[in-house]
Image (tube, rainbow, N blue to C red):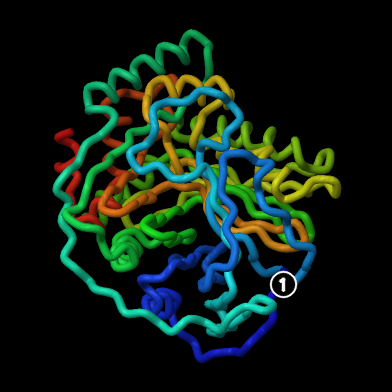
Amino acid sequence: MSWQLAETLPWQEPLALAAQHAGVDMALLYSGLHEEFTGKLSYLFLNPLEEKSGDDWAQLPPLPSSTDGLPLWVGYLGYGMREDDTHGDKSPVSLPDFRLVRYGALFRFDHEQQLVSLYQSTNAQPVATPHTTYHAPLTVFKLASNLTRAEYEQSVAATIERIHAGDFYQANITRKFFGEFDAAPDSFALFAKLCEASPAPYSAYIRHGSSAILSSSPECFLSVDASGVMTTRPIKGSARRVADEAEDTKIRAALATSTKNHAENLMIVDLMRNDLSRASESMSVEVIEQSKLYSYRTIHHLISTIRAKKRADVSAYDAVRACFPAGSMTGAPKIAAMQWCAAQEKLERGVYSGAIGWFGGGDTCDLSVVIRTLIIDGNRFEFQVGGGIVADSTPEDEWRETLTKARGILAALGLSEADVAAL
């Protein structure tokens, strides 16, 4: 299992090249927003050769021994791969708990040097002839949620009571929105709309048969480089963006000085430090940045950066499992928070709250957190949003935060906040 460089091509934007192959199974990991820590590389994978899917860590495919630094297995690990045994009803769009695919062709986009390199797997077929696809009008004619506004606010209030009782410090209660289109949509055209409405450093599009995952995630779950350095960047602390520049500056300043949001972030940093320590060399865990403010098109976020050195006896799978799922999606302590969240949400999260990305040779990987993500299967769809509840949260503010986090997906779907606020 290795890559061979086939040719170097003139620069093309990843979305433009991927659009030429819309309508076939593929994976696109798209750095759609440049940040100091990302935006350098994107990857387009074509010609699937082998698929592994299931519901258990033992079923994951063997990692390659090559050290070329290139991704090989690409896909997702869903929230069902978590350690606790609390489960709800099946999600409206039900996919395997994990799916990883090995492809025959890889386009590597170097955004800084404006280079496109085509790699092909040993004995793979040539890249398929580009397909054309239709761009039919999109109509959402059914929309529902697992929790009404009243139910969500009641759940937040109950969570606050449990926090005051000492059961946990923070819990990430989420709402799932789901529905149907009038027909199976052109999922790649919809992904392009999502990238326009909500550009993100960890955008991803994965098509497999009738299903597609469209993600505009801003959050790095875990990366492990060739030297064994593990990095995670949890997000906790959010505020909506507005068109008025002066008002937006005030909102940004309020988030930067918010005791509540900084406390929320600190709790998850402590949790992720502990998770990383399970796979790292002694005394190597280090907080590089604490609650740094980043602004995206629809939202402001507080992001922290934590690094550690992976132990030599730990594989990339082991490192991911030690940290899975992302603490920003659970709360702390992790197991108690996950059990409480499952009881409140009733429906399984599915792919949401898991991880999307790749595993490569030399025990390397790069995975984002599955947030700001639309899941499609045929004409059915779902997406999910939520926030970390802490002692000084208020139910109404947390409800409003779910609307803020849904803005990018709603825009891509041609819906408004009012459409989901009424549910």
- Residue 42 seen in this snapshot: no
61 vs 316, nearest the viewer: 61
Which part of the image, by quadrant, shows the C terminus? Answer: top left
Residue 421 percent coordinates (x, y): 18, 36
Q: Identify the secondary structure beneath mark 1.
A: loop
Amino acid on which the number 1 mark rests in the picture = Ser
124 vs 28, left or right, is: right
Q: Is residue 315 above or below residue 105?
A: above
Residue at the location (29% across, 68% down)? 189
Q: Please identify the quarter of the rendering in which residue 177 is found.
A: top left
Q: Please identify the quarter of the rendering in which residue 192 is found.
A: bottom left
Residue at the location (37% across, 14% down)? 158
Residue 44 percent coordinates (x, y): 51, 72
Q: Which residue is mark 1?
A: 2
Residue 36 percent coordinates (x, y): 55, 63
Residue 152 percent coordinates (x, y): 29, 25
Q: Is residue 157 above or below residue 219?
A: above
Residue at the location (45% across, 76% down)? 14
